[in-house]
Amino acid sequence: LSWAAFSAYDTVLDAKDRRQAQDMARQVQSQLRAFALRHGRLPCPDASVAGTGLESLVGGVCGNGNRIGWFPYVSVGAGLPVAEYRARYAVYRAPNASAAADADLALALERTGDAIGHVNHSDAGDLIVALNNVAGLALASDQPYLSGDGGVAGAVDCTANRLMSVAYWIVVPLKDRSGDGERLDPPHASTGPCVFSPGTPVSATNDDVVLSESPAQLAGWLRQSLP
Ligand SMILES: [Ca+2]
Ligand SMILES: [Ca+2]
Ligand SMILES: [Ca+2]
């Protein structure tokens, strides 16, 4: 083993926490995908400060401009994890007056012209249309996006290295490594739409675990999973 394997911030205990966080992130992904398949939209972020686990719905729909919050564990039928493993969550939302061009992933909307009552009304097929619409939009700095990984994907720099938009990201915060009193560590913040690329290694000042999917990845999974 190299000397680096014993560096102060990569102890056996921390590695165990990281694996656990990665498992938790994959569980959230499964819950999110199952929800999307069933409801034809992505879950609405839980915008409460403490994290109640409930979608922040207004009159039954995801509140205007609500793109970042906690993952709504309770609303997808899961239990609320302890703070260390409780994920922040962002979803791409770009509404359009034309349903066929709409790219609000948290909104169940008829985008293919099926009548009310039709079996394909506002279903996962309509979400696939929205995902394709997202893929066609230029990167916007107020929508969820990825920066680099400090390696092949380039620097972790939310301004100078904006890599790509994502359908959603989740961040499992683990400990406060940056010492600012928040479990999230920069560049991650409770309101920012930028995260580093999944797979970014742990560092002395950041142990956050990121998982995300591009619109094409999620659309591919939905297509494959449709009955
Ligand atoms: Ca439809
Ligand atoms: Ca952290
Ligand atoms: Ca921190």
Image: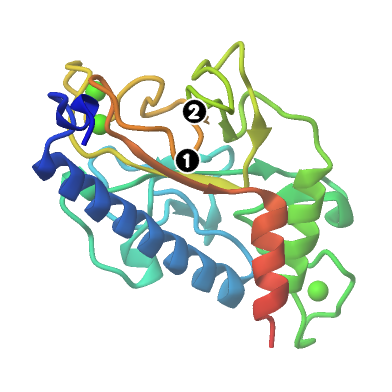
State the count of labels.
2
Q: Residue at x 32, y 42 (%)?
A: 48
Q: Is residue 119 above or below residue 61?
A: below
- Quadrant field for ligand 2: top left
According to the image, label 1 marks what residue? 198
Q: Is residue 120 above or below residue 136?
A: below
Q: Amino acid at mark 2?
A: Asp
Q: Position of residue 32 (x, y in %)?
A: 48, 63
Image quadrant assignment for residue 160: top right
Mark 2 and ligand 2: say if the CB distance to the nearest ligand atom is below 8 Å: no
Is 63 on the left-hand or right-hand side of 130?
left
> For the residue labelled by badge 1, is the local secondary structure a helix, a strand or a loop?
loop
Give whichever of 11, 213 is nearer the camera. Answer: 11
Q: Position of residue 19 (x, y in %)?
A: 26, 52
Q: Position of residue 131 (x, y in %)?
A: 73, 54
Image quadrant assignment for residue 121: bottom right
Within 10 angstroms of label 1, few (less than 14), some, or many (20 or more) residues? Answer: some
Quarter the N terminus occupies: top left
Marks 2/1 in contact by CB < 8 Å: the verdict is: yes
Q: Which mark is on residue 84?
A: none
Image quadrant assignment for residue 180: top left
Is 150 on the left-hand or right-hand side of 23?
right
Q: Indicate how the structure is coloured in the image.
A: rainbow
Between the C-alphas of marks 2 and 1, the distance is 7 Å
Give whichever of 5, 38 is nearer the camera. Answer: 5
Mark 1 and ligand 2: say if the CB distance to the nearest ligand atom is below 8 Å: no
- Does residue 109 show up? no
Is 8 on the left-hand or right-hand side of 217?
left
According to the image, label 2 marks what residue? 149
